[in-house]
Protein backbone atom coordinates (compact mmCIF):
# COMPACT_ATOMS: atom_id res chain seq x y z
CA UNK A 1 0.00 0.00 0.00
CA UNK A 2 1.12 3.48 -0.63
CA UNK A 3 0.61 6.99 0.41
CA UNK A 4 -3.00 7.42 -0.58
CA UNK A 5 -3.75 10.18 1.84
CA UNK A 6 -2.69 12.67 -0.82
CA UNK A 7 -6.12 12.96 -2.46
CA UNK A 8 -7.56 13.88 0.90
CA UNK A 9 -8.59 17.48 0.94
CA UNK A 10 -9.72 19.34 3.98
CA UNK A 11 -7.83 19.77 7.21
CA UNK A 12 -4.11 19.47 6.60
CA UNK A 13 -1.01 20.16 8.59
CA UNK A 14 -1.12 23.73 7.29
CA UNK A 15 -4.64 24.28 8.55
CA UNK A 16 -3.73 22.79 11.88
CA UNK A 17 -0.71 25.01 12.23
CA UNK A 18 -2.63 28.03 11.10
CA UNK A 19 -5.20 27.26 13.74
CA UNK A 20 -2.44 26.81 16.27
CA UNK A 21 -3.66 23.31 17.02
CA UNK A 22 -3.70 19.77 15.81
CA UNK A 23 -6.39 18.67 13.36
CA UNK A 24 -8.23 15.41 13.97
CA UNK A 25 -7.21 12.22 12.17
CA UNK A 26 -9.09 11.56 8.93
CA UNK A 27 -7.77 8.20 7.88
CA UNK A 28 -7.74 5.18 10.17
CA UNK A 29 -5.81 2.15 8.94
CA UNK A 30 -6.72 -0.95 10.90
CA UNK A 31 -4.05 -3.56 10.27
CA UNK A 32 -6.05 -6.47 11.61
CA UNK A 33 -3.30 -9.06 11.32
CA UNK A 34 0.21 -9.53 9.99
CA UNK A 35 -0.74 -13.04 8.88
CA UNK A 36 -0.84 -13.34 5.10
CA UNK A 37 -1.07 -16.13 2.55
CA UNK A 38 1.17 -14.14 0.18
CA UNK A 39 4.91 -13.59 0.46
CA UNK A 40 5.42 -10.42 -1.58
CA UNK A 41 8.95 -9.15 -1.95
CA UNK A 42 7.82 -5.53 -1.45
CA UNK A 43 5.50 -6.10 1.52
CA UNK A 44 5.17 -2.98 3.69
CA UNK A 45 4.77 -4.91 6.93
CA UNK A 46 7.73 -4.64 9.29
CA UNK A 47 10.58 -7.01 8.43
CA UNK A 48 10.41 -8.30 12.01
CA UNK A 49 6.63 -8.89 11.92
CA UNK A 50 7.17 -12.47 13.09
CA UNK A 51 8.11 -11.09 16.51
CA UNK A 52 4.67 -9.43 16.81
CA UNK A 53 2.07 -12.17 16.81
CA UNK A 54 -0.44 -10.64 19.19
CA UNK A 55 -3.71 -9.40 17.73
CA UNK A 56 -6.43 -7.25 19.24
CA UNK A 57 -9.69 -9.12 19.76
CA UNK A 58 -13.03 -8.10 18.28
CA UNK A 59 -14.11 -5.99 21.25
CA UNK A 60 -10.79 -4.15 21.28
CA UNK A 61 -11.06 -3.34 17.57
CA UNK A 62 -14.62 -2.11 18.03
CA UNK A 63 -13.40 0.21 20.78
CA UNK A 64 -10.72 1.54 18.41
CA UNK A 65 -13.32 2.18 15.70
CA UNK A 66 -15.61 4.06 18.08
CA UNK A 67 -12.82 6.22 19.50
CA UNK A 68 -11.36 7.03 16.08
CA UNK A 69 -14.75 7.96 14.66
CA UNK A 70 -15.44 10.15 17.67
CA UNK A 71 -12.14 11.94 17.00
CA UNK A 72 -13.28 12.65 13.44
CA UNK A 73 -11.76 9.90 11.27
CA UNK A 74 -13.95 9.35 8.18
CA UNK A 75 -11.96 6.91 6.08
CA UNK A 76 -11.25 3.43 7.37
CA UNK A 77 -9.02 0.87 5.75
CA UNK A 78 -9.12 -2.76 6.86
CA UNK A 79 -5.70 -4.04 5.98
CA UNK A 80 -3.02 -6.43 7.14
CA UNK A 81 -1.43 -8.88 6.29
CA UNK A 82 -4.60 -10.30 4.87
CA UNK A 83 -7.63 -8.95 6.75
CA UNK A 84 -9.81 -11.81 5.44
CA UNK A 85 -7.92 -14.12 7.78
CA UNK A 86 -9.93 -12.52 10.59
CA UNK A 87 -13.32 -14.17 10.80
CA UNK A 88 -14.73 -11.11 12.59
CA UNK A 89 -14.12 -8.87 9.57
CA UNK A 90 -17.80 -8.72 8.64
CA UNK A 91 -18.73 -7.77 12.19
CA UNK A 92 -16.13 -4.99 12.25
CA UNK A 93 -17.29 -3.67 8.86
CA UNK A 94 -20.89 -3.54 10.09
CA UNK A 95 -19.92 -1.57 13.19
CA UNK A 96 -17.72 0.78 11.16
CA UNK A 97 -20.40 1.45 8.57
CA UNK A 98 -22.94 2.14 11.27
CA UNK A 99 -20.53 4.63 12.83
CA UNK A 100 -20.38 6.49 9.50
CA UNK A 101 -16.95 5.44 8.23
CA UNK A 102 -16.32 5.01 4.51
CA UNK A 103 -15.08 1.44 4.70
CA UNK A 104 -12.29 0.15 2.46
CA UNK A 105 -11.13 -3.45 2.36
CA UNK A 106 -7.52 -3.73 1.25
CA UNK A 107 -6.98 -7.32 0.25
CA UNK A 108 -5.04 -9.85 -1.80
CA UNK A 109 -8.41 -11.43 -2.58
CA UNK A 110 -7.34 -14.77 -1.13
CA UNK A 111 -10.29 -16.05 0.86
CA UNK A 112 -12.79 -13.63 -0.69
CA UNK A 113 -15.48 -16.17 -1.46
CA UNK A 114 -18.96 -15.45 -2.78
CA UNK A 115 -20.33 -16.07 0.68
CA UNK A 116 -18.00 -13.54 2.28
CA UNK A 117 -18.61 -10.99 -0.47
CA UNK A 118 -22.33 -11.30 0.19
CA UNK A 119 -21.84 -10.90 3.94
CA UNK A 120 -19.55 -7.90 3.46
CA UNK A 121 -22.07 -6.27 1.14
CA UNK A 122 -24.76 -6.80 3.73
CA UNK A 123 -22.49 -5.36 6.42
CA UNK A 124 -22.18 -2.19 4.32
CA UNK A 125 -18.64 -2.41 2.98
CA UNK A 126 -18.13 0.55 0.62
CA UNK A 127 -15.19 -0.48 -1.51
CA UNK A 128 -12.62 -3.18 -2.17
CA UNK A 129 -9.01 -2.63 -3.15
CA UNK A 130 -7.63 -5.77 -4.76
CA UNK A 131 -3.91 -6.24 -5.25
CA UNK A 132 -2.27 -7.78 -8.26
CA UNK A 133 1.45 -8.23 -8.64
CA UNK A 134 1.44 -8.23 -12.45
CA UNK A 135 -0.70 -8.81 -15.53
CA UNK A 136 0.91 -12.20 -16.08
CA UNK A 137 0.45 -15.33 -14.06
CA UNK A 138 4.19 -16.05 -14.12
CA UNK A 139 5.35 -12.80 -12.56
CA UNK A 140 2.34 -12.41 -10.24
CA UNK A 141 2.94 -15.84 -8.84
CA UNK A 142 6.70 -15.46 -8.62
CA UNK A 143 6.61 -12.08 -6.82
CA UNK A 144 4.04 -13.28 -4.29
CA UNK A 145 5.63 -16.73 -4.07
CA UNK A 146 2.19 -18.30 -4.49
CA UNK A 147 -0.08 -19.61 -7.25
CA UNK A 148 -2.73 -16.97 -6.93
CA UNK A 149 -3.10 -15.19 -10.28
CA UNK A 150 -6.06 -17.18 -11.59
CA UNK A 151 -7.79 -16.98 -8.23
CA UNK A 152 -7.34 -13.19 -8.12
CA UNK A 153 -8.88 -12.91 -11.61
CA UNK A 154 -11.93 -14.86 -10.43
CA UNK A 155 -12.16 -12.72 -7.30
CA UNK A 156 -12.07 -9.50 -9.36
CA UNK A 157 -15.00 -10.78 -11.40
CA UNK A 158 -16.91 -11.71 -8.23
CA UNK A 159 -16.26 -8.29 -6.63
CA UNK A 160 -17.90 -6.58 -9.61
CA UNK A 161 -20.71 -9.13 -9.68
CA UNK A 162 -21.53 -8.17 -6.09
CA UNK A 163 -21.63 -4.53 -7.10
CA UNK A 164 -18.62 -3.19 -5.23
CA UNK A 165 -16.54 -0.28 -6.49
CA UNK A 166 -13.08 -1.71 -7.05
CA UNK A 167 -9.61 -0.27 -6.96
CA UNK A 168 -6.99 -2.45 -8.55
CA UNK A 169 -3.60 -1.96 -6.97
CA UNK A 170 -0.36 -3.03 -8.55
CA UNK A 171 3.05 -2.32 -7.05
CA UNK A 172 5.52 -1.43 -9.80
CA UNK A 173 9.24 -2.13 -10.09
CA UNK A 174 11.88 -3.19 -12.57
CA UNK A 175 10.17 -6.44 -13.52
CA UNK A 176 6.64 -5.28 -14.25
CA UNK A 177 7.10 -1.65 -15.37
CA UNK A 178 7.44 -2.86 -18.98
CA UNK A 179 3.98 -4.48 -18.62
CA UNK A 180 2.19 -1.33 -17.57
CA UNK A 181 -0.01 -1.28 -20.69
CA UNK A 182 -1.10 -4.87 -20.05
CA UNK A 183 -1.80 -4.08 -16.40
CA UNK A 184 -4.00 -1.14 -17.43
CA UNK A 185 -5.80 -3.30 -20.00
CA UNK A 186 -6.39 -5.89 -17.29
CA UNK A 187 -7.88 -3.25 -14.96
CA UNK A 188 -10.16 -1.96 -17.74
CA UNK A 189 -11.30 -5.46 -18.65
CA UNK A 190 -12.09 -6.17 -15.00
CA UNK A 191 -14.15 -3.00 -14.66
CA UNK A 192 -12.04 -1.34 -11.96
CA UNK A 193 -13.12 2.23 -11.22
CA UNK A 194 -9.60 3.14 -10.11
CA UNK A 195 -6.19 1.74 -10.86
CA UNK A 196 -3.40 2.50 -8.48
CA UNK A 197 -0.02 1.98 -10.07
CA UNK A 198 2.19 2.33 -7.06
CA UNK A 199 5.87 2.37 -7.70
CA UNK A 200 7.66 0.58 -4.91
CA UNK A 201 8.61 2.75 -1.96
CA UNK A 202 11.73 1.42 -0.34
CA UNK A 203 10.88 0.50 3.23
CA UNK A 204 10.67 -2.81 5.03
CA UNK A 205 10.86 -5.78 2.71
CA UNK A 206 11.18 -3.58 -0.37
CA UNK A 207 14.24 -1.91 1.19
CA UNK A 208 15.81 -5.32 1.71
CA UNK A 209 15.09 -6.11 -1.94
CA UNK A 210 15.77 -2.70 -3.42
CA UNK A 211 18.78 -3.77 -5.50
CA UNK A 212 16.45 -6.20 -7.23
CA UNK A 213 13.41 -3.96 -7.55
CA UNK A 214 14.67 -0.50 -8.45
CA UNK A 215 13.77 0.33 -12.06
CA UNK A 216 15.74 2.44 -14.52
CA UNK A 217 14.88 6.02 -15.37
CA UNK A 218 14.10 4.90 -18.94
CA UNK A 219 11.58 2.33 -17.71
CA UNK A 220 9.82 4.98 -15.63
CA UNK A 221 9.66 7.53 -18.42
CA UNK A 222 8.26 4.92 -20.81
CA UNK A 223 5.67 3.74 -18.27
CA UNK A 224 4.54 7.28 -17.49
CA UNK A 225 4.01 7.95 -21.19
CA UNK A 226 1.84 4.82 -21.45
CA UNK A 227 -0.17 5.89 -18.39
CA UNK A 228 -0.71 9.35 -19.87
CA UNK A 229 -1.91 7.83 -23.14
CA UNK A 230 -4.48 5.68 -21.33
CA UNK A 231 -5.59 8.61 -19.17
CA UNK A 232 -6.44 10.47 -22.36
CA UNK A 233 -8.28 7.57 -23.99
CA UNK A 234 -9.91 5.85 -20.98
CA UNK A 235 -9.76 8.35 -18.13
CA UNK A 236 -13.53 8.59 -17.90
CA UNK A 237 -13.88 4.86 -17.31
CA UNK A 238 -11.02 4.35 -14.89
CA UNK A 239 -8.99 6.84 -12.91
CA UNK A 240 -5.33 5.90 -13.08
CA UNK A 241 -3.03 6.94 -10.25
CA UNK A 242 0.68 6.71 -10.84
CA UNK A 243 2.65 6.99 -7.63
CA UNK A 244 6.17 8.07 -8.55
CA UNK A 245 9.12 6.36 -6.90
CA UNK A 246 10.81 9.05 -4.88
CA UNK A 247 14.35 7.77 -5.41
CA UNK A 248 14.14 9.44 -8.82
CA UNK A 249 13.06 12.82 -7.47
CA UNK A 250 15.04 15.80 -6.21
CA UNK A 251 12.47 16.95 -3.70
CA UNK A 252 10.93 14.63 -1.11
CA UNK A 253 7.28 13.66 -0.94
CA UNK A 254 5.03 15.29 1.65
CA UNK A 255 5.01 11.99 3.45
CA UNK A 256 1.66 10.97 4.98
CA UNK A 257 0.65 14.60 4.42
CA UNK A 258 2.55 15.29 7.62
CA UNK A 259 3.41 13.27 10.72
CA UNK A 260 0.32 12.93 12.90
CA UNK A 261 -1.64 15.15 10.47
CA UNK A 262 -4.29 12.92 8.90
CA UNK A 263 -3.17 9.30 9.21
CA UNK A 264 -3.61 7.03 12.20
CA UNK A 265 -2.46 3.44 11.81
CA UNK A 266 -3.19 0.72 14.33
CA UNK A 267 -0.95 -2.35 14.10
CA UNK A 268 -2.38 -5.83 14.83
CA UNK A 269 -1.22 -5.69 18.46
CA UNK A 270 -2.77 -2.26 19.05
CA UNK A 271 0.35 -0.15 18.57
CA UNK A 272 -0.64 3.27 17.21
CA UNK A 273 1.52 4.58 14.37
CA UNK A 274 1.66 7.88 12.41
CA UNK A 275 2.81 5.83 9.38
CA UNK A 276 2.88 2.07 8.85
CA UNK A 277 6.67 2.09 8.50
CA UNK A 278 7.23 4.16 11.66
CA UNK A 279 7.62 1.12 13.84
CA UNK A 280 11.18 0.82 12.55
CA UNK A 281 12.19 4.15 14.14
CA UNK A 282 14.29 3.72 17.28
CA UNK A 283 13.97 5.87 20.38
CA UNK A 284 10.22 6.41 20.02
CA UNK A 285 7.84 4.60 22.27
CA UNK A 286 4.66 4.14 20.25
CA UNK A 287 1.56 4.07 22.43
CA UNK A 288 -0.88 1.16 22.45
CA UNK A 289 -4.65 1.40 22.28
CA UNK A 290 -5.03 -1.27 24.93
CA UNK A 291 -3.75 1.04 27.66
CA UNK A 292 -4.12 4.58 26.27
CA UNK A 293 -7.18 6.44 25.00
CA UNK A 294 -7.00 7.24 21.30
CA UNK A 295 -7.52 10.96 21.95
CA UNK A 296 -4.49 10.97 24.27
CA UNK A 297 -2.50 9.07 21.66
CA UNK A 298 -3.39 11.47 18.86
CA UNK A 299 -3.20 14.79 20.68
CA UNK A 300 -0.88 14.24 23.60
CA UNK A 301 1.55 11.36 23.04
CA UNK A 302 5.22 12.07 22.53
CA UNK A 303 5.25 9.73 19.52
CA UNK A 304 2.56 11.62 17.58
CA UNK A 305 3.91 15.04 18.56
CA UNK A 306 7.54 14.18 17.79
CA UNK A 307 7.60 15.43 14.20
CA UNK A 308 4.62 17.76 14.12
CA UNK A 309 5.28 21.37 13.17
CA UNK A 310 8.79 22.53 12.27
CA UNK A 311 10.63 22.74 15.61
CA UNK A 312 12.17 19.28 15.30
CA UNK A 313 13.83 20.07 11.97
CA UNK A 314 17.57 20.28 11.44
CA UNK A 315 19.42 21.99 8.62
CA UNK A 316 19.00 22.12 5.68
CA UNK A 317 15.24 21.85 6.41
CA UNK A 318 15.05 24.30 9.29
CA UNK A 319 15.90 27.37 7.21
CA UNK A 320 14.51 26.04 3.93
CA UNK A 321 11.69 28.00 2.34
CA UNK A 322 10.20 24.79 0.93
CA UNK A 323 9.74 23.19 4.34
CA UNK A 324 6.04 24.05 4.46
CA UNK A 325 5.56 22.26 1.16
CA UNK A 326 7.22 18.90 1.81
CA UNK A 327 7.57 19.04 5.63
CA UNK A 328 11.07 17.64 5.29
CA UNK A 329 9.90 14.47 3.53
CA UNK A 330 9.74 11.05 5.10
CA UNK A 331 11.01 10.40 8.64
CA UNK A 332 11.41 6.68 8.05
CA UNK A 333 13.46 7.23 4.92
CA UNK A 334 15.63 9.79 6.72
CA UNK A 335 16.32 7.23 9.41
CA UNK A 336 16.91 4.34 7.01
CA UNK A 337 19.46 6.25 4.95
CA UNK A 338 21.08 8.60 7.48
CA UNK A 339 20.50 6.96 10.85
CA UNK A 340 18.63 10.02 12.18
CA UNK A 341 14.89 10.40 11.66
CA UNK A 342 15.12 14.19 12.19
CA UNK A 343 17.41 14.70 9.22
CA UNK A 344 16.19 15.84 5.82
CA UNK A 345 14.83 13.03 3.67
CA UNK A 346 17.82 12.22 1.44
CA UNK A 347 15.57 12.26 -1.62
CA UNK A 348 16.04 16.03 -1.37
CA UNK A 349 19.12 17.14 -3.27
CA UNK A 350 19.81 19.67 -0.51
CA UNK A 351 20.48 16.73 1.83
CA UNK A 352 24.15 15.83 2.28
CA UNK A 353 23.09 12.19 1.95
CA UNK A 354 21.41 12.67 -1.44
CA UNK A 355 24.48 11.27 -3.23
CA UNK A 356 23.68 7.88 -1.69
CA UNK A 357 20.41 7.74 -3.57
CA UNK A 358 21.92 8.98 -6.83
CA UNK A 359 24.61 6.33 -6.56
CA UNK A 360 22.08 3.64 -5.80
CA UNK A 361 19.93 4.54 -8.79
CA UNK A 362 23.01 4.54 -11.03
CA UNK A 363 24.10 1.15 -9.78
CA UNK A 364 20.63 -0.30 -10.30
CA UNK A 365 20.58 1.11 -13.78
CA UNK A 366 23.92 -0.50 -14.59
CA UNK A 367 22.77 -3.78 -13.12
CA UNK A 368 19.58 -3.69 -15.17
CA UNK A 369 21.49 -2.87 -18.34
CA UNK A 370 24.34 -5.29 -17.82
CA UNK A 371 22.61 -8.03 -15.89
CA UNK A 372 24.87 -11.00 -15.43
CA UNK A 373 25.94 -13.07 -12.48
CA UNK A 374 28.22 -10.44 -10.98
CA UNK A 375 25.27 -8.31 -9.91
CA UNK A 376 23.10 -11.16 -8.77
CA UNK A 377 21.32 -10.43 -5.50
CA UNK A 378 19.15 -12.64 -3.34
CA UNK A 379 15.44 -11.89 -3.18
CA UNK A 380 13.91 -12.07 0.26
CA UNK A 381 10.32 -13.24 0.15
CA UNK A 382 8.20 -12.05 3.02
CA UNK A 383 7.71 -15.11 5.18
CA UNK A 384 8.15 -16.16 8.78
CA UNK A 385 11.57 -17.77 8.32
CA UNK A 386 12.99 -14.71 6.57
CA UNK A 387 11.36 -12.39 9.10
CA UNK A 388 13.03 -14.21 11.98
CA UNK A 389 16.33 -14.34 10.16
CA UNK A 390 16.42 -10.71 8.99
CA UNK A 391 15.42 -9.40 12.40
CA UNK A 392 18.14 -11.42 14.08
CA UNK A 393 15.76 -13.78 15.85
CA UNK A 394 17.22 -16.85 14.21
CA UNK A 395 20.03 -17.88 11.93
CA UNK A 396 18.52 -21.06 10.64
CA UNK A 397 18.29 -20.17 6.95
CA UNK A 398 20.96 -19.11 4.51
CA UNK A 399 20.25 -15.80 2.80
CA UNK A 400 21.68 -16.95 -0.51
CA UNK A 401 20.30 -20.43 -0.91
CA UNK A 402 17.58 -21.00 1.67
CA UNK A 403 14.39 -22.50 0.34
CA UNK A 404 12.56 -19.32 1.14
CA UNK A 405 14.75 -17.15 -1.05
CA UNK A 406 14.89 -16.82 -4.79
CA UNK A 407 17.44 -15.19 -7.03
CA UNK A 408 17.26 -12.94 -10.01
CA UNK A 409 18.05 -15.86 -12.29
CA UNK A 410 15.11 -17.73 -10.90
CA UNK A 411 12.89 -14.74 -11.67
CA UNK A 412 14.19 -14.74 -15.21
CA UNK A 413 13.59 -18.44 -15.62
CA UNK A 414 10.01 -18.18 -14.46
CA UNK A 415 9.10 -15.13 -16.50
CA UNK B 1 -18.66 -2.67 -16.98
CA UNK B 2 -21.17 -0.93 -14.75
CA UNK B 3 -20.25 2.65 -15.48
CA UNK B 4 -20.33 2.07 -19.22
CA UNK B 5 -23.67 0.31 -19.27
CA UNK B 6 -25.10 2.94 -16.96
CA UNK B 7 -23.89 5.76 -19.17
CA UNK B 8 -25.15 4.16 -22.35
CA UNK B 9 -28.55 3.22 -20.92
CA UNK B 10 -29.37 6.79 -19.94
CA UNK B 11 -29.97 8.63 -23.19
CA UNK B 12 -28.32 11.86 -22.06
CA UNK B 13 -27.05 11.36 -18.52
CA UNK B 14 -25.87 14.94 -18.30
CA UNK B 15 -29.47 16.10 -18.28
CA UNK B 16 -30.31 14.44 -14.97
CA UNK B 17 -27.07 14.43 -13.04
CA UNK B 18 -26.57 11.76 -10.43
CA UNK B 19 -23.79 11.16 -7.95
CA UNK B 20 -21.83 8.06 -8.95
CA UNK B 21 -22.30 5.12 -6.64
CA UNK B 22 -18.67 5.10 -5.59
CA UNK B 23 -19.21 8.41 -3.76
CA UNK B 24 -20.99 9.04 -0.50
CA UNK B 25 -22.07 12.49 0.58
CA UNK B 26 -22.36 12.99 4.32
CA UNK B 27 -22.18 15.59 7.05
CA UNK B 28 -18.98 15.43 9.07
CA UNK B 29 -19.24 17.14 12.47
CA UNK B 30 -15.44 17.13 12.89
CA UNK B 31 -15.08 19.09 9.63
CA UNK B 32 -18.16 21.18 10.24
CA UNK B 33 -18.94 20.54 6.58
CA UNK B 34 -20.42 18.14 4.11
CA UNK B 35 -17.83 15.86 2.58
CA UNK B 36 -17.69 13.57 -0.40
CA UNK B 37 -16.18 10.22 0.49
CA UNK B 38 -14.77 7.84 -2.09
CA UNK B 39 -12.24 4.99 -2.03
CA UNK B 40 -9.50 6.15 0.33
CA UNK B 41 -10.23 9.80 -0.19
CA UNK B 42 -12.36 12.69 0.94
CA UNK B 43 -13.28 16.08 -0.44
CA UNK B 44 -14.55 18.78 1.87
CA UNK B 45 -17.41 20.66 0.24
CA UNK B 46 -18.51 24.23 0.67
CA UNK B 47 -22.18 24.81 1.33
CA UNK B 48 -23.31 25.51 -2.21
CA UNK B 49 -21.45 22.50 -3.60
CA UNK B 50 -23.09 20.31 -0.97
CA UNK B 51 -26.56 21.69 -1.66
CA UNK B 52 -26.19 21.03 -5.38
CA UNK B 53 -24.72 17.54 -4.98
CA UNK B 54 -27.42 16.53 -2.48
CA UNK B 55 -29.91 17.02 -5.28
CA UNK B 56 -27.92 15.10 -7.91
CA UNK B 57 -29.90 11.86 -7.60
CA UNK B 58 -30.86 11.34 -11.22
CA UNK B 59 -34.40 12.67 -10.80
CA UNK B 60 -33.86 16.34 -11.66
CA UNK B 61 -32.65 18.04 -14.79
CA UNK B 62 -30.72 21.30 -14.65
CA UNK B 63 -33.82 23.49 -14.73
CA UNK B 64 -35.52 21.58 -11.91
CA UNK B 65 -32.33 21.64 -9.87
CA UNK B 66 -31.92 25.38 -10.26
CA UNK B 67 -35.56 26.05 -9.52
CA UNK B 68 -35.43 23.98 -6.37
CA UNK B 69 -32.24 25.64 -5.11
CA UNK B 70 -33.60 29.11 -5.84
CA UNK B 71 -36.75 28.26 -3.92
CA UNK B 72 -34.87 26.73 -0.99
CA UNK B 73 -32.49 29.65 -0.61
CA UNK B 74 -34.83 32.41 -1.71
CA UNK B 75 -32.54 33.60 -4.43
CA UNK B 76 -32.46 33.93 -8.21
CA UNK B 77 -30.03 33.92 -11.10
CA UNK B 78 -27.85 31.01 -9.97
CA UNK B 79 -28.13 28.92 -13.13
CA UNK B 80 -24.68 29.85 -14.43
CA UNK B 81 -23.11 28.97 -11.10
CA UNK B 82 -24.90 25.62 -10.92
CA UNK B 83 -24.02 24.84 -14.53
CA UNK B 84 -20.34 25.61 -13.89
CA UNK B 85 -20.28 23.49 -10.77
CA UNK B 86 -21.89 20.53 -12.54
CA UNK B 87 -19.32 20.78 -15.31
CA UNK B 88 -16.56 20.73 -12.71
CA UNK B 89 -18.16 17.82 -10.86
CA UNK B 90 -18.38 15.89 -14.14
CA UNK B 91 -14.72 16.62 -14.93
CA UNK B 92 -13.78 15.32 -11.50
CA UNK B 93 -15.83 12.20 -12.12
CA UNK B 94 -18.26 12.77 -9.26
CA UNK B 95 -21.45 12.71 -11.30
CA UNK B 96 -22.72 11.02 -14.41
Image (cartoon, coloured by chain):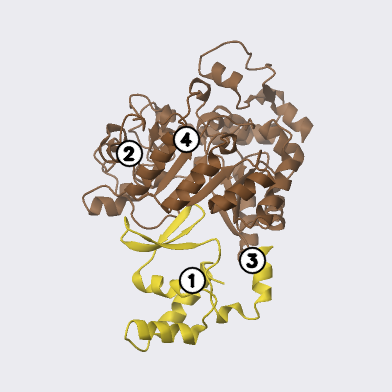
> What kind of element bears circle 2?
helix
Quadrant position of residue B1: bottom right
Chain ID of residue with mark 4: A
Numbered disc in front, either 3 or 1: 3
Is the residue A74 above or below the residue A81 in the image?
below
Q: Residue at x 74, y 34 (%)?
A: A147
Q: Is residue A349 visible?
A: no
> In this rendering, do the residues under marks 3 and 1 share a single chain?
yes
> What kind of element bears circle 1?
helix
Mark 2 lies on residue = A294
Chain ID of residue with mark 2: A
> CB under 8 Å between callouts 4 and 1?
no
Mark 3 lies on residue = B3
Q: Residue at x 61, y 35 (%)?
A: A213
Mark 4 lies on residue = A58
Quadrant position of residue B69: bottom left
Report the front residue among A131 and A151. Answer: A151
Q: Which chain is yellow?
A: B
Q: Residues within 10 Å of mark 3 (few under 14, many from 20)?
A: some
> CB under 8 Å between callouts 1 and 2?
no
> Left or right of B1: which side holds A68?
left
> CB under 8 Å between callouts 2 and 3?
no
> In this rendering, do the residues under marks 1 and 2 share a single chain?
no
Question: In the displayed image of the protein, which residue is found farthest to the right?
Answer: A413
Chain ID of residue with mark 1: B
> CB under 8 Å between callouts 3 and 4?
no
Q: Which chain is brown?
A: A
Quadrant position of residue B96: bottom right
Mark 1 lies on residue = B89
Q: Earlier in the sequence, mark 2 or mark 4?
A: 4
Numbered disc in front, either 1 or 2: 2
Amino acid sequence: MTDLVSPVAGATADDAQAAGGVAPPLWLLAELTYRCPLHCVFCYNPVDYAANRRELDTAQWIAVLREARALGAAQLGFSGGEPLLRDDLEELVAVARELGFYTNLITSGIGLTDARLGALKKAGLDHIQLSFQDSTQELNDFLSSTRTFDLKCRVAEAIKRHGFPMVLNCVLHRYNLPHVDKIIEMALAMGAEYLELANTQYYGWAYKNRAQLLPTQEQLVAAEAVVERYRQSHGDRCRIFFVVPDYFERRPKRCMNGWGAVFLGIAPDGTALPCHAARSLPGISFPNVTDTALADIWYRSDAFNRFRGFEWMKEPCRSCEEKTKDLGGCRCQAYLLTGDAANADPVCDKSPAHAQIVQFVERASEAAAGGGGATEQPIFFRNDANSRKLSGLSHEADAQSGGACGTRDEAGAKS
Amino acid sequence: MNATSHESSAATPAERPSLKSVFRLQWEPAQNAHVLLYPEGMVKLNQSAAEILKRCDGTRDLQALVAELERAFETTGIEAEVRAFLAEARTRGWIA
